[in-house]
Amino acid sequence: MLDPPKFAPTVAHAERAARAYKDVNLWALRLLAPGGLLATFSCSGGIGAEFFQKIVAGAAQDAGADAQILDRLQAAPDHPVLLSFPEGEYLKGLLLRCV
């Protein structure tokens, strides 16, 4: 399970934070055996779910790992997001399986 700190509090920090998210996922994917599961998360409001998936996909490619997305994870329904503050949808995650 990867639950790193908030690397990108705002969109302005997204590119620099992407490197940090890629690195931690790369290290984890290199250690994951075939059939192993990885739950990886981002709590950065400046990183959207699509961008996070792209980062993790890049990490998997660099690690030489084939991984499947088993589930996309997010905050529970009791954490509503204001339309005027999309960064409030800060928690996102992926459940992956190495194949």
Image: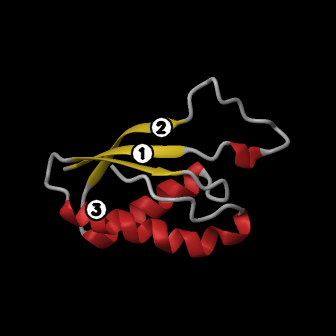
Q: Nearer the viewer, residue 75 or 62?
A: 75
**Mark 3 vs mark 2, CA separation in Å:** 18 Å
Give the image location of residue 33, x and y in percent. Answer: 14, 55
**Amino acid type of the residue tagged 1 in the rendering:** Leu
| Location of mark 3 (residue) | 28
Report the residue at 15% width, 46% height from top.
Answer: 35
Taking 58 as reference, is 15 left or right?
A: right
Report the residue at 57% width, 44% height from top.
Answer: 91
Quarter of the figure with residue 77:
top right
| Location of mark 2 (residue) | 73
| Location of mark 1 (residue) | 94
**Mark 1 vs mark 2, CA separation in Å:** 6 Å
Give the image location of residue 29, x and y in percent. Answer: 27, 61
Q: Nearer the viewer, residue 97 or 75?
A: 75
Report the residue at 14% width, 52% height from top.
Answer: 34
Taking 89 as reference, is 20 left or right?
A: left
Circle 3 residues within 10 Å: few <14, some 14–19, many ≥20: some
**Amino acid type of the residue tagged 3 in the rendering:** Ala
Taking 16 as reference, is 2 left or right?
A: left
Q: Are marks 1 and 2 in contact (CB under 8 Å)?
A: yes
Q: Is residue 17 above or below residue 42?
A: below
**Amino acid type of the residue tagged 2 in the rendering:** Leu
Report the residue at 32% width, 72% height from top.
Answer: 62
